[in-house]
Image: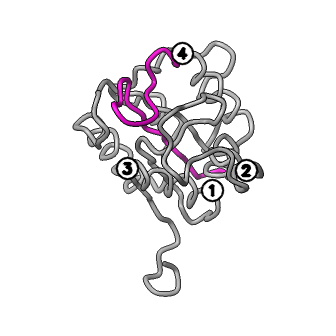
Amino acid sequence: AIETLGYRRVVLIGLSGGGWTTTLAAAIDPRIMLSLPVAGSIPCDFRHESWDFEQYCDHRWAQVANYTSLYVLAALERGRASVQMLHEADNCCFHTCHRHERIREYNTWVRSQIEGGFVTSATAGNMHEVNDRDKVVIASLIERFRANGKVSPSDLIALPFNLLAQPEADQPLTQHVI
């Protein structure tokens, strides 16, 4: 991207396997300043049952750098942000129903390891797609990134439609500067 087009800051979005690719690419390429994986992964300890081939946690790469590690790497540096987008009742993969507390726990841990920003946004929905709510979240974040050159902690706190948006007493997002 830099050599051919001159881009130094990249925004990457993907759904399902594309969301998995977004998570992986953002972990290894620091030019990806904002990553928005939609229904692409969830930590291995969730014991999810409908994995795609590349997402099995017994693969060698997953033994070295599990999903939680990839989330950390995607927002490790100041100025980078990753918003993991999941659906409450996704009929395919990575639903958030009855998982809110555990998701908040790994969000808190990831944020304790990074200088950038990370949040999981769980929206109402039962289809494995980029739904209208997701489109609003994506558009608002891209507009913030375009206008300001970054996504701020307040942008992550104020995500519309996020069912996980209840404040966390022990680790508020505002402690992390992007």
Label 2 sits on what residue type? Ala
Asked if the residue under mark 1 is in contact with the one under mark 2, i.e. CB atoms within 8 Å, the reply is yes
Q: In which quarter of the image is residue 44?
A: top right
Residue denoted by label 1 = 27
Asked if the residue under mark 3 is in contact with the one under mark 4, i.e. CB atoms within 8 Å, the reply is no
Left or right placement of residue 35 versus residue 79 in this view: left
Mark 4 to mark 2 CA distance (whole Å): 29 Å
**Label located before the other in sequence (1 or 3):** 3
Mark 4 to mark 3 CA distance (whole Å): 27 Å
Viewer-side residue, 106 vs 30: 106
| Magenta stretch in the rendered image | 78-100
Residue denoted by label 4 = 167
**Residue 14 falls within the magenta-colored stretch:** no
**127 above or below 124?**
below
Mark seen at residue 15: 3
Label 4 sits on what residue type? Pro
Left or right placement of residue 124 versus residue 67 in this view: left
**Label located before the other in sequence (4 or 3):** 3
Q: Which residue is drawn at 77% across and 52% down?
A: 64
Left or right placement of residue 49 versus residue 39 in this view: right
Residue denoted by label 2 = 65
Which residue is at the far right? Answer: 64
